[in-house]
Each structure stands twice: as structure tokens, then as C-alpha cells.
Amino acid sequence: MTLSWEVLLRRASNGDHAGVTSLLLKADEAERLAFAAEVAAGIKGLDRDAWWQPPSHPAGGLLLAVLATAPSASAAAGLLTRRDMRPGWRSAPLSRVSEIAAARELTWLGDLGVRLAQKLPTRDTWATGDWQFTAALLAAGGTEPPVTEGYVRGWLLHLLRPAWGENMPSVPLADRLRDDPHLEVLLPGIFEFDGLGADIGGTAWNEETQSYDTTPRLPGAIAALVAEGHTDRATVLTATIDRLVRGDKPHALRPFAVLHDALAPTAGEMAPFAPGYSRLLGEAPGAVATLGQKALRAVDDAGRLELETLLDASSAALLRKEKTLVKAQLTWLERVARREPARAGDVYEAIAVAFGHPALDIQERALAIVEKAQPSTIARLAPAATALGGDLPARAAALFGSAAATPGPATPAPPAPVPVAPMPAPITDAAELAEEIVLLVHGGTAVGWERVLAALVALTAAGEPPADALTPVLDRHPGSFEEHSWNEGSPLLGLGTAIRPVSPTLERMTAAVAKARDEGRRDFPLSTLPTGVLGLRAAEIAANVAAGSVPMLVATPTHVNGNLDAAELAARLGRAEAEGWQPWHFDLEQALLRVPRGADPAVAAGLTSPAGRRFADWLAGGGLPDPVSTAVTQTGEKNDRGEYTWDLPLGRRIAASLRPAREDGLRLTRQLLTHEPEEFAAWMPDDFSGSEDVLTMVLPHHREVAAAWALPEIATLADQDQKGAGVLLPLLADCSGPVGPAMAYAMAYAFGAKQESDRSAAVDAFLTLAAGTEPFAGAVGAAFADLCSDTTVKLGRAVPALTDAHRAGASAAVWELLTAALPPLLTTRVRAVPDLLQLATQVAVALGTTEVIPGLAEVAARHGSARLVLEARRLLTTTGGPA
């Protein structure tokens, strides 16, 4: 018979695996081998769209064709490891694979399995189908699996999350491990590869509690095999400790910590690993460090821990942020100092390391222990006391004398204003323009957009139409520059239409621009969000650029934050008058919105054209008045049974409404300054993800407007533990304008973000605002107290960020925030309030302030030694209040 690629492809595209197998096996081996070259050429020649043509993906059927025609394992692997063929690993029926292998009497399936195992994904935790196909090839060839990261990961996930229909969840995991023929080969790999522990957290349904157990199942199963002698205990324990010592992300180490506890090693077993446990105590994530501390304590209690090992471990441990662990270490060292008086001086010297801990209560605890030392030892420790902070230096001076009075590091100077960078040089030729447009396709910046739009207009007007250079870019990315349901109104579509006008897209854009100009309303397909102004401007260029009547855009900023110097705009409008042209409507409006408030109206003197007089009137009227911004409380939506519709209930979220203060005469501002949040909080809003700088560049001198629109997205950093939106905060800080409720709540939410990168962005923004002249910290403090009072924002996350701001020199602004936040927080039961009081003490000492915070004296007067009371007394004493 004659084998045909067209017939094969049709059957494969229809998902007809039986038909593919029948077609190939009806031919003899010589015909199949002769057909191999055509199969290879056909697979390599398929374009991207062909792989996704309905009714199904052809890779499964083509995989069977490769196995039925390939002359060797290397030839088969070369085709099967192509990216477009990978879906076939999961969709091809293994029964058909076996049928083809038997018919051809293949001897190289095991070799093929080894080759494919080298290409298994190492991060796609759900791609177990890839592993199953590879494992089937290895089993068919009787070949031992290679210990590669991808293969071990797939094997592990197959054990923990077997495919539906295999009926394996009913079999205890320990039994499945014990019966696995490759356990001895693959089990060591679990400990070898970084990140693999994150996949071990498999849980199981507990019939008794009717819930999922949160403890990883695999550690218990391995411990069971160890207990019955099926797996060597010493080998597993060594591998476990080695895995913990090498380090990894906390969630990836947790299963190994659970395994360590399940093995319950004795002090004798742990003693040889004391150096490793010492490293855990100083370097590992908190929970693992605590494990190391307990292990070392057990070894010490057994009399098998060298003192030098303990002292070395303590140097790093006593500066850790986990205060419970640090306090336990101090108690341990105090006991050792009593136990070994001959070495007490060395032990107290280790304890003095805690004088440098950021928490005052830790410093105080260490100082109290050192006070019990011998006079000779106390004199030896005097230099370390210079690291003490808050109210402790005076107490230290009484103990150490003048040696402890030497001041520690000076408080950093307040942050100096950093000028906003000017815009880069304009694009001057079509080749550079093409390069910049490619960057926009792959996630460009607002600065890039401004340069591209300006260059497109300027080059076209100069008689250098860039279409020849730009057409290949458009052809390479049709999904971005041609109209589809997912990009209607996008700036890329407007840009593509400006370069290559296409009907009816151009007609629709022209009509949308006219409607926005006549009615002040951006309707679909133009976005109504502030970032939609960029799409509107691109559409305006598309509607007008072909006429060549305008040689330049007047709205191009002079600075990267969107600011446009008034003198520069006056010069551009003066050029327009001299050359006899008028800027386009929205180009001029965007330019006016970018001129800084308070610009001297004299710069527009002498301008007589309609655009020039409009600019002069704009300056004379003071520019755009600040809109009215109001905080609005949203609630989490509930269903008919009164249950929250989200997996994580959200009691409330603060959003902000906007309305214009008065009529300003611009079409753009009708939608920019009108915003009314929905009644219910949105689940993970992301309206401005990836376009944050586009948002802030629309109104660079009215940061409150951008903050109001983006506040729900910023709020999710804290109330939904999302990440990334913090990048907006430094951009807002680089803008100007009063800080209203939207900006204040945005800062408060970002200080309580889950991700450190977002909290760091909030600190950067705080420092920038502190270097400016606009008052802001009191408003942020009030918002901060509101959100933290009911744990909408977790105060414990925010305190380290505020501490960083203080240490970076913004102490005065931090104090202003604290004086606004502490009075309402002192009346709550929020756990981290003592930490905030401790920070306030450090800031008060740095500033030398005597301002007493309202409500502090009442808390300090309470009976007892609760930490809240102790920290309140410390702050009150520091600021000159009654002890």
C-alpha cells in the first residue's frame, strides 16, 4: 500500500488514533521505514496555526506515526522532543503505543525512554502525563529509569496524585512506595533536587475530620518504611539533614522538617551532625532554624555538644527576626554560662551580640543577663553596648560606665529630593522606530509609547513614511496590530492602523475619536479606564496622520513621569502658529493635563492661535482643579445563604470615589475624574497590571486620581496576598499633587503587602514623599490605623517596612505617621501594637522629640507586665512623660 502524509495528518487531526495505527500497521516494515522521512518533513513543516486547527491537536496521532516509522531511538527522540509534539506525550493512548511496538518488535524503546526522560519538565507540576508516557517506554524496554530531576518529579507526583481511574488513592502511600520496583533508585532523588520539596506537600482526605490533612503524607510514608527496616534509617536521616542544610524555600523544606521529626532521631544520632544543625540555626528559614535549635539543645543536654559549636551558632542566631527563637537561645546561653563558669566570659560575649538586635525587648533581655556577669567580664563587653537603642543606653551607662556612652551610628540624614529624569532623546529614523515598536509588543513602557507616537507623526510629516520599515513588524505580530475581539481599542491596534490603514478598522476608530471629541465619552471599543487615553491618542493619530497636516505631537512629555514643561509647550504652540497648523484635539488636551500646576501664565504671552489662547486661559485659571476624592467602604459579596462567595472571605475593602470639583472645559476629564466604585469588592482586580506607568503619565500632577482608580488593585496586596501592584507606588510618589484618601490608603495597604518586594516599593515611595513638600504622613497614619485595627492589613507585616523607612532617614515622616496611627490602635487588641510602640521609641530617640502620644499614659499606667504596657512605659519615658 502507499502511505500518504495528507491521510495521516487528517486522521491525526481528527484524534483518530485507531485509524492512524491501522493505517501504519497495514504497511510492511520497509514501507514504514521509507515513509519516515516524509513524516519527519511533515512534522517540521507544519506552521503554528496548523497545530491548533480543530477538531483536535494532531500531536497524539503524529507521535504514533513517529514510533511506527522511526529507524532508531535517536531519530524518534529528535521528533518527539519538539515543542509542538509535547502534547502528544499526554494524549497518545499507551495501548496503541504497545500495539505498534509489538508489531515492529522494537528493541530501542528503553533507549528512547531514557532520552525523553532527559527532557521531562522540571517545573510543570501537573505534567504527569509526560512522565507516564516516558515511564511506559522504559518499562517496555526493561530499562532502569534515569535519576533526572524531571523524572523524579514526575514519579513523585504520580505517587501523590495518581491519574483518575487508576484507583490508587485507596492504597496507602507507604504500601505503594514499598511495592514500587524503582524505590531504591529514585528515592534518593527526592533529597537531591532543589525545589522538589514543594511537590511533596500532597494531602489526603480525612474521613474522621471531613477535611484535608495539611501535613504532607510522604514523610510519614518514608518514616514507616524506615521503621519496618525496608529502607536504611541512617541513609534517610543523613539525606534529610543534608537536604535541610543545603537550604531552599521554606515551603520546599517543610516536608523534610516533618520527615526529620517523624524519624525522631536520638541525641546520639544527631551528635555527628551538630555542625549542620548549627548552620540551620543561623541560616535556615524560621521553622527549620527552630528544628536545628532543638536538635542542638538535645545534643547539648546529652553532653555531646562542643561549646565552640554553640557559640558560633549563637552569633547569627541572636540577630534573627524570630524573637521566640532568639529568646530561647538567650535562655540556653544563660544556663550554659552558669554551668561552665570557666567559659562564662565567652558565653556572655556571645550573648552581647543580641545588643545589636533590632527589637528593644531582645536588647533589654540580653542586657539583663549580662548584668549578672562578673565585673571583669562586664568591662570586656562595654564596646558592644554602643549598639543598644531606645532607652537602653542610659541603663547601659550605669552598668558599663562611660565606655557605653559612645553613641552608635548616626541617624541617616533625611532623604533629599531626587529630580525626575528627562525624557530620552527622540527617535530619528525608521529603523530605530521599528525596534522600539517591537519592544512595545513585548511589554513596553509609557516612555516608549510616547517616543514611538511622537516619532511616527514626525517621520511621516517629514516625508519619510516609515511603513516600509514597519510593515515586517506588523506582519510578524498580526495578533497585536490587526483587529480581533481581544484587542479592540488597544493602543497597538491604533498604532498598527496608523502605519497601515485598514478598513473598516480605520472608519470605526475615526468615528470613536469623533464621538469622544463631541460628547466627551469614550465608549467601546475604546477603554473607559484612564489608561484608555493612550488608545484614544493612538486612534486619533490613525485617523489623522495620513493627511500629514501636523508635523509633531505637542503632548510628548519632557520628563519620564509625564511632566511637560510649560515653556516647552509654549514653544511647540508657537511653532504651530508660525507654520500655520493646529494640534489635534486630544493631543492638546493631554498636553494641558501634563503641565505642572502653578506654571507662570506669562509663558503663553503672545500666543494668538486657538490652541495658544486655550493654553493661556488654562494657565491663567490655575490648570486642572483637584477633584473631590472620598474613601468608600466595599464589602465582600455573599450568596443567598450568607456565605462569602470567595474562598478567602473579605469583610471590607477601602476604595475611593472621584468627582470633578468644577467644569474645566476638557473632554478627557469627564471620565478621568468620575469614578464610583462598585458596592462589592472585586476579586483580584488587575485593570492596570503592566500599564502602571501609562496610568500615572496621564495626570502626572494629580497623583490622587491615579491612586483612586488603582486602589482596589493595590488593596489586594494585603487583603488577598497578591503581588506586583506595589510597582505603582514609586510612580505615584514621583508625581505631584496633594495626598488624599486614595493615596493614603494605597500606601497603608502596600505597607501591609504579603510580598517583600511590594513592601519595599512602599518604602521607596514613602522616602520620595518624605523628601517633598506635600504633607502626607498624617493621612497615611490615619488610614494605616483604620486598616490595621480590624486586621484588614496585618500590622506585623508593616512594622519592618516602617522601620526601614526610619533607618533610611525618613524619621520625621515616620513619627508623624505613628502619632496619627497609635492613638486608635492603642485601644485595640492587635498583636503587633507593642512592636509599633517599640519602633516609636527608636524614632523618638533619633529625633529627640518630647511629643507625648495621646492615650499612651493611660496604657502605661495599667498594672502588670504585658508587653504592650512595658513598651508604652518605655515610649512614655523616652518622650519625657512620667515613668
Image (tube, helix red, strand yellow):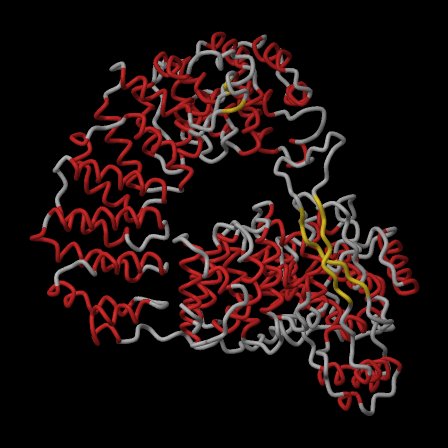
* Drawn side of residue 489 relative to residue 772, left or right: right
Which quadrant holds the C terminus? bottom left
Quadrant position of residue 52: top right
Residue 346 vertical placement versus 808 (above, below): above
* Drawn side of residue 552 relative to residue 759, left or right: right
Residue 842, x across and y down, in percent: 41, 67
Residue 295, x across and y down, in percent: 24, 37
Residue 787, x across and y down, in percent: 60, 54
Q: Residue at x 64, y 31 (%)?
A: 51
Depth check, front residue: 240 or 544: 240
Residue 273, x across and y down, in percent: 19, 37
Q: Residue at x 12, y 46 (%)?
A: 339
* Drawn side of residue 385 relative to residue 688, left or right: left
Name the outermost residue toward the right: 518
Quadrant position of residue 462: bottom right
Depth check, front residue: 502 or 204: 204
Asked if residue 364 shows in the view, the reply is: yes
Depth check, front residue: 674 or 453: 674
Which quadrant holds the N terminus? top right
Asked if residue 552 shows in the view, the reply is: no
* Drawn side of residue 670 relative to residue 347, left or right: right
